[in-house]
Image (spheres, rainbow, N blue to C red):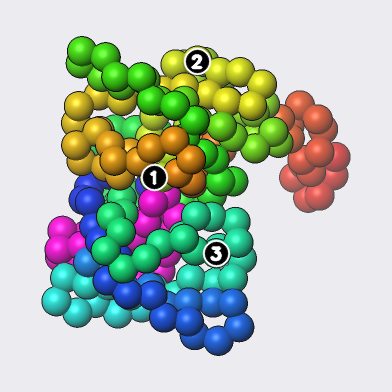
């Protein structure tokens, strides 16, 4: 579990195909690797990956074919910056919102509108996800916890403050660039419960 508060802007070192449609990715992140061990979880652009090895501030992780198909990780190349966050520790402050690191779909930046102290950025999202996005609700974009400022049938907009623009990949991306999206998991649970699709204790409905 994560919070969507990016700890470090890392860098892709290399990607290596490991057979089939999977890959091994190596990412430089001195902060997130400072206490990382084999089996730990680190979110890379919002995707929860399991640490395989750590060496000199670089960690490696296996990326399965399903992850490559459902996220924008497959488009990463050596030198690309990535948002990094270690798994949340019990007892720590929840600065963003509950983020699983399970990407629901890939969106796309549509437009950016600079203002004096922030930027408004509009994203296109898959139609199947639009029902989970509400004004003033939470959404995760490339691992960054954001508050929805406006929403339409197939788009939503957020306001990015200078800190977010400087310390995450969202400051450098432009129209047409893909982003990983994770909607608020609470919205999905509420939908399931209201639809009567969740089994009760012991499997009874």
In primary-sequence order, the first of circles 1 and 3 is 3
Task: List x then y, in percent, for residue 202.
Answer: 78, 50
Q: Which residue is located at x 41 percent, y 45 percent? A: 142
Mark 2 falls on what kind of element? strand
Q: Which residue is located at x 49 percent, y 30 percent? A: 110
50 within the magenta span = yes
Question: Residue 113 occupies which quadrant of the picture?
Answer: top left
Q: Are marks 1 and 3 in contact (CB under 8 Å)?
A: no
143 and 204: which is toward the camera: 143
Q: Which residue is mark 2?
A: 150
Q: Which residue is mark 3?
A: 68
Q: Which residue is mark 1?
A: 143
Mark whose residue sits in front, 2 or 1: 2
Vertical placement of residue 63 versus 17, above or below: above
In primary-sequence order, the first of circles 3 and 2 is 3
Q: Which residue is located at x 46 percent, y 51 percent? A: 101
Mark 2 and mark 1: Cα distance apart in space:
19 Å
Alpha-carbon neighbours of circle 1 within 10 Å: few (<14), some, or many (≥20)? many
Q: Magenta segment, which residues?
A: 29-51
204 and 157: which is toward the camera: 157
Q: Which image quadrant: the C terminus?
A: top right
In primary-sequence order, the first of circles 2 and 1 is 1
Task: List x then y, in percent, for residue 204.
Answer: 85, 44
Vertical placement of residue 62 versus 169, above or below: below
Mark whose residue sits in front, 1 or 3: 3
44 and 178: which is toward the camera: 178
Majority secondary structure of magenta residues: loop
35 within the magenta span = yes
């Amino acid at each position: 579990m994560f919070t969507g508060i990016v700890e470090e802007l890392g860098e892709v070192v290399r990607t290596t195909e490991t057979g089939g449609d999977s890959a091994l990715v190596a990412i430089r992140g001195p902060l997130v690797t400072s206490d990382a061990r084999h089996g730990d979880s680190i979110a890379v652009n919002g995707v929860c990956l399991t640490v395989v090895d750590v060496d000199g501030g670089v960690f490696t992780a296996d990326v399965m074919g399903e992850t490559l198909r459902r996220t924008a990780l497959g488009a990463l190349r050596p030198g690309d910056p990535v948002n990094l966050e270690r798994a949340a520790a019990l007892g720590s402050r929840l600065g963003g919102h509950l983020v699983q690191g399970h990407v629901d779909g890939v969106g796309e930046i549509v437009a950016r509108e600079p203002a004096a102290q922030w930027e408004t950025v509009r994203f296109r999202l898959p139609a199947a996800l639009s029902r989970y996005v509400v004004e003033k609700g939470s959404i995760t974009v490339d691992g960054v916890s954001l508050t929805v400022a406006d929403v339409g049938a197939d788009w939503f907009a957020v306001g990015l403050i200078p800190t977010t623009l400087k310390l995450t990949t969202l400051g450098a991306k432009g129209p047409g660039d893909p982003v990983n999206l994770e909607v608020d998991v609470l919205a999905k649970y509420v939908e399931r419960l209201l639809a009567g699709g969740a089994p009760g204790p012991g499997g009874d409905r």
